[in-house]
Amino acid sequence: MKMKLFVAASIAILCLSGCKLVKTGEPGKDGAGGDQERVSNVVATTFDSKLVPALREKAVDLPALQAAIKSGLDGAGKSYGVRVGGAGGGWNFSVKGTGVVVEEDLATKAAVAKVDVDGDGKPDATLQLGPVVKGTALRDTTTLYDFSTFRDQIEYAKLGRALNEKAVSSLSLPKGSLNGKKLSFVGATAIRSATEQPLIAPVSIEVAP
């Protein structure tokens, strides 16, 4: 009997010696819930007070940006943009413009309106109206959000989505179709090719009466 107890105790000690005890994070500090709380706080304290003013201050007129891109995307990026993630990450630009909606798709979760800003009747850019917004241009177009200050890539990705959601919820648009309406916008876009039409995440859209 003593021998059995000795063997059992030995096995237990060996198991414990091969295991690492990991402390569970406190609620609101670690894990998915903690990430979301931190991200929500960042958005609440920076979106209106810092991000939107920064985008407005840096915003380049869309026709001027597109003309610069035709002369060379990297040159336009160095003059007006911010690059995140090296050469493969493309350039992020703050943009503004005024145009007429010539196409729209409001029936999907990723609703969009395409605008003509040069008067030729053809779309020059696409405004994302949400609720689903693609990309992380709002996060990446300024230097407000430094990856090194976040826990990991997952939390950083959550920030991108949260900023998109906040931007969409802040838009004030009339009900019904936007086709033929003239509007002014400010937002952010990521460009990876000189032939790519801007897909803009707007933080402001004003529709002419």
Image: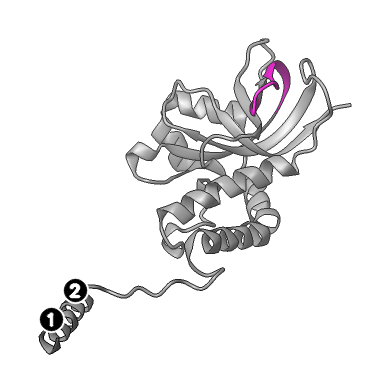
Q: Residue furthest right?
A: 209
Residue 179 belongs to the span the image colors magenta: no
Viewer-closest of 23 and 194 = 23
Query: What is the C-alpha distance between the residues marked 1 and 2?
Result: 17 Å
Judge left or right: residue 168 versus residue 62: right
User: Which residue is at a point 50% across and 47% down the rendered structure image?
Assistant: 140
Residue 60 visible in the current orientation: no
Viewer-closest of 13 and 87 = 13
Protein image colouring = one colour
174, above or below 103, in the image: below
Res. 18 mark: 2
The residue where tag 1 is placed is 7
Residue 102 belongs to the span the image colors magenta: yes
Please provide the residue range marked out in magenta: 98-111
Q: Residue furthest left?
A: 3
Q: Where does the image place residue 124, in percent across and percent down from the top left?
A: 60, 20
Residue 194 visible in the current orientation: yes
* Quadrant that contains the N terminus: bottom left
Three-letter amino acid code at disc 1? Val
Q: Where does the image place residue 197, in percent across and percent down from the top left?
A: 52, 23
Three-letter amino acid code at disc 2? Gly
Q: In which quarter of the image is residue 14?
A: bottom left
User: Overall secondary structure of the magenta stretch?
Assistant: strand
Judge left or right: residue 175 versus residue 100: right
183, above or below 21, in the image: above
Q: Is mark 2 on a helix, strand or loop?
A: loop
Q: Where does the image place residue 142, in percent across and percent down from the top left?
A: 54, 50
User: Which residue is at a point 65% across and 48% down the rendered structure image?
Assistant: 57
134, above or below 145, in the image: above
Q: Where does the image place residue 165, in percent across and percent down from the top left?
A: 64, 44
